[in-house]
Amino acid sequence: MTAFDHKVATAYRWPIDDLVAPAGEARFVEIGRMLGEPSENERFRGGHLLVRRGKLLRRQTPA
């Protein structure tokens, strides 16, 4: 995560690769990602991370 100046308040950029691990820890599974180069009026690359909720592990109760 990197802070950068914004007109209203400090904003943050999160590289897509840095979001995958915390998503996995929260039981999300990566389905896909899209990355794009900045247009002439943008300062940074943009991206989207598509995730879905993974299967929940059920606790085994003793018999």
Image: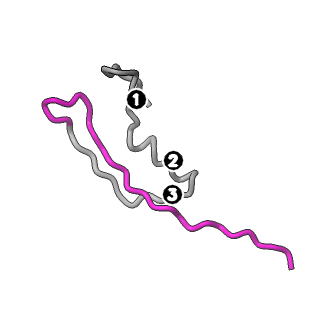
Looking at the image, is 50 positioned above or below residue 39?
below
Q: Quadrant of residue 17?
A: top left
Identify the secondary structure beneath mark 1: strand
Residue at 45% of width from left, 44% of height from top? 19
* Label disc, if present, on residue 28 of the rendered structure: 3
At which x and y percent is residue 55? 56, 68
53 sits left or right of 56 in the view: left
| Camera-side mark, 3 or 2 | 3
**Mark 2, other Cα within 10 Å: few <14 / some 14–19 / many ≥20:** some
Residue 26, image x, y percentages = 57, 52
The amino acid beneath tag 1 is: Tyr
Q: Position of residue 12 (x, y in %)?
A: 40, 29
What residue did someone put label 1 on? 12
- Magenta-highlighted residues: 38-63
Instruction: Kindly identify the amino acid type of the residue bearing the numbered disc 3.
Output: Phe
Q: Earlier in the sequence, mark 3 or mark 2?
A: 2
> How far apart are labels 1 and 3 at the CA level?
22 Å
Please report contact status of discs 1 and 2: CB closer than 8 Å, yes or no: no
Give the residue at x 76% y 72%: 60
Q: Real-space Cα distance between discs 3 and 2?
A: 9 Å
- Element type at mark 2: helix
Q: Quadrant of residue 16?
A: top left
Magenta-drawn stretch contains 48: yes
How crowded pointer 1 is (Cα within 10 Å; few <14, some 14-19, many 20+) is rated as few
Q: What secondary structure is the stretch in magenta mostly built from?
A: loop
